[in-house]
Image (spheres, coloured by chain):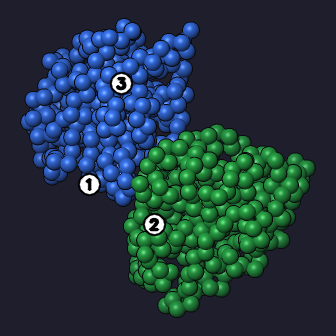
Chain colours: A blue, B green
Amino acid sequence: MSDLMLVVLGNTEVATIPGISVAGASPELTKFTPPADIEYVLCGKPLIIDAIPVTPEGHPTPAIITKACYELADFPIVAVRGGSILSPKVPFVQITDEHGRDFRRESAVPNVEEIVKNARMFGQELRKFVDELVIGESTPGGTTTAQAVLWALGYRAKTSSASPSNPHQLKEEVIKEGFRRIDADIGCFADEPYKALQEFGDPMLATVAGICLGFDKSVVLAGGSQMLAVSAFLKAAGENLSRFRIATTKYVVNDSSSTFRETAEEIGIEFWTAMLDFSSSAYKGLQDYERGYVKEGVGAGGAVYLAAKNGFSEDDVARKVDELYALLKKGES
Amino acid sequence: MSDLMLVVLGNTEVATIPGISVAGASPELTKFTPPADIEYVLCGKPLIIDAIPVTPEGHPTPAIITKACYELADFPIVAVRGGSILSPKVPFVQITDEHGRDFRRESAVPNVEEIVKNARMFGQELRKFVDELVIGESTPGGTTTAQAVLWALGYRAKTSSASPSNPHQLKEEVIKEGFRRIDADIGCFADEPYKALQEFGDPMLATVAGICLGFDKSVVLAGGSQMLAVSAFLKAAGENLSRFRIATTKYVVNDSSSTFRETAEEIGIEFWTAMLDFSSSAYKGLQDYERGYVKEGVGAGGAVYLAAKNGFSEDDVARKVDELYALLKKGES
């Protein structure tokens, strides 16, 4: 049996709240980010739009790290549609086509049980022919829904952000407004994890969680804050967390504006850290990862984990990332 | 690495021509057959409609054979949407959502190159973690499009049918009318296999062919006439057929109203025969398989091949099919 990486594509209306997400050059463009990310990884260029996703200041999507690992270590990657607004123009497994709603106004994921059931079925099939599963995601706005879910499950967490200036105050205002909708407070759904996802989550979280429930072997949750929310859900749903690990980047682990380490410990989920270092990169857009831009996404940490499993170091990965960035720059001229 | 079975779901407008297809209780119901088939295999009951697909005279879908093998041998099955009108309500890999057009009026599969490209990408990813691939299908009306493609590629073939009274004359009239649309004749696309698929095929054929091109290891084509068409396409497209085999049922191989053996030999494709025997079945609906009803479908022959690979005989399978049929009957009362 072999390892497999999935990248779950999702969207939430929360991403269109101005200032919430930089996972796309503007809020309106965030619907293109997930398909463009996976198209870039698998095909070398996005198909759904003309350019790879960048932050408003031009920092490249972390898909460039995932792609570097994918090319070096040649592991399989399959896209999964977990509520992205658009389908990617590459083969994908459809779990749900319903995107996440704005939880300030309504339930975020009304069909959470259907999603988890469908995703679980897929996980059950995968267990027959996959050894270790690595699950990443691309879900603009997803650190906000992740934080809302963590709060609802009882963790006073601060999630990371692709921006070096984590919009904490805005995130908290948005979440509190969502809580007011149904008179919720921290820990109100500690024993009702499906409710937490339904009211405040996003379909990517439900999809990843469902796959984890069905694939009852070793799973690497490839991401930062969002995978903390998945872990917290699984624990509340009665899963023993010993077969799960988070794999994320040092940028998330070292993010002092977030409570990653503390919350991981509180939940009781182990994590592996990709010790990437772009300080020697030829390109400012990548050097800026060292200053807190972007940090993680598209399963970057998990991809580095798989690269390491196949004998490639973080230095090998960083070198490959620079090569890919050079190609992107060439393509622009 | 492990084996994997795919079931490609497709539709063609040709199925709605009265008398052409019995893969559904009526022509209008044939759009439900592919999703209902795979839902029955994976979930034990269809979700998209209330009853499993049957022929107009009540014979059960060959999905019952596939399901029997799936339950005995526990191999993984994943649904692939290769142009089915409807999505199944189970996880599926989307290759194309465009169904096949009526080739008497227009090109059958205008986006054939896009489908093959997408399917090839999927096959390439699968090769990294799958050992042997078994590909079945559910495509009402597909034996007619298969015959049209075979003719266009130069084979004077007569394909099988789920009906014991193979509607040969009607099929030939329909195909000749399609040929007249573009002044085609037998062998007109012998060197242009993509044209053959584009003008006269269906999206399932394009999907299976594309996956085969990308998955450059051992493939078992699980079906009868339709897999002859895929084989003929692959050969014309320059593939060495030595890594391919057809696995089908004895009902197809022994169908004297079709040219299965002769055409397989002419193409140069090996085939494995599932020596099923329902003559001792407790149920007339299954005994009638011995009289030429249904014969094959939903990868039945390939599923029996995988069951055999896992140590289960055709007798084991037949016994399990009877058990499943009993459950169906119980569900109806």
Q: Is residue B36 above or below residue A166?
A: below
Q: Position of residue B186 (x, y in %)?
A: 87, 57
Residue kind at label 1, given as amino acid type:
Asp
**Residue drawn at x 11%, y 40% as measured from the top left:** A268
Identify the residue at horizontal 57%, vertical 62% (top origin). B220
Q: What residue sits right under mark 2 in the picture?
A: B41
Residue highlighted by disc 1: A216
Q: Amino acid at mark 3?
A: Asp
Instruction: Report the front residue among B96 and A174.
Output: B96
Q: Mark 3 — residue?
A: A316
First of labels 3, 1 by sequence position? 1
Q: CA distance from mark 2 to mark 1?
A: 21 Å
Could you tell whether B199 is left or right of B321 in the image?
Answer: right
* Chain bearing mark 3: A
Report whether residue A257 is seen: yes
Q: Residue at x 38, y 41 (%)?
A: A6
For discs 2 and 1, the disc positioned in front in the rendered view? 1
Q: Chain of mark 2?
A: B
Classify 10 Å Cα crowding around label 3: few (below 14), some (14-19), many (20 and above).
Answer: some
